[in-house]
Image (cartoon, rainbow, N blue to C red):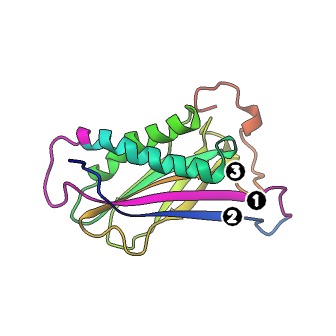
Amino acid sequence: MSLIEIRKRSLTIETIYHEGGPVPDQPLRIAAACAVIRNPYAGRYEPDLLPFMAELRSLGTLLATELVDTLGKDKVEVYSKAAIVGVDGELEHAAVWHEAGGWAMRAVLGEPKAIVPASKAVAATGYRLMVPLHYIHACYVRSHYNSVEIGIQDAPRPKEILYALVMGTGGRIHARLGGLTKENVSVHDGQR
């Protein structure tokens, strides 16, 4: 029997045309794919979460593929992941998404090296979470530090978990604060 029972999914796309300055050649697009599932461990302690984490890879692949299909694999420059656990669960039920969601995005995108940033919480239904974003090939590319809000109005219910993956097509519109640029990444270690 599968540990993953999806109640609903959502796909949100934010398109940013400018930030008060000149309109760029291409708008920035940030997409968040979310899935709300039943928490198989709600209300009880489960000592072994590894089978759940392994099974979540399929959900991660589903969401990552949806994002790549939406934005275009060759256009994705930033990514992140997030989880919101309903109040009958625990933070560790969100932490399983670090491996499962991160692994899925790396596999779908062709193994970028930068760590996949994340945010997680145990919260009431309707909670909104700010999710950090950064460049997929080197996490110290300052122009690509950004964030996006994820959440669904009726989720997660107390015995549910909302898992999200986020991808975007570039750095901040009008980024001009110096630091490492994507063109100057040279070490290829996921950092610089």
Q: Which mark is residue 27?
A: 1
Q: Residue at position x 19%, y 59% from top?
A: 42
Residue located beneath label 2 in the image: 15
How far apart are the alpha carbons under marks 3 and 2?
13 Å
Indicate whether 121 appears above or below 177. below
Left or right of 131: which side holds 176?
right
Instruction: Give x and y (percent) for residue 123.
Output: 32, 67
Q: Marks 1 and 2: CB-CB under 8 Å?
A: yes
Kind of residue indicated by mark 3 = Gly
Mark 3 in CB contact with mark 2 (< 8 angstroms)? no
Which residue sits furthest front? 1
The answer to whether residue 8 of the structure is visible from this angle is: yes
Foreground: 85 or 145?
A: 85
User: SS for tag 3?
Assistant: loop
Q: Which mark is residue 171?
A: 3
Q: Earlier in the sequence, mark 1 or mark 3?
A: 1
Which range is magenta? 22-51
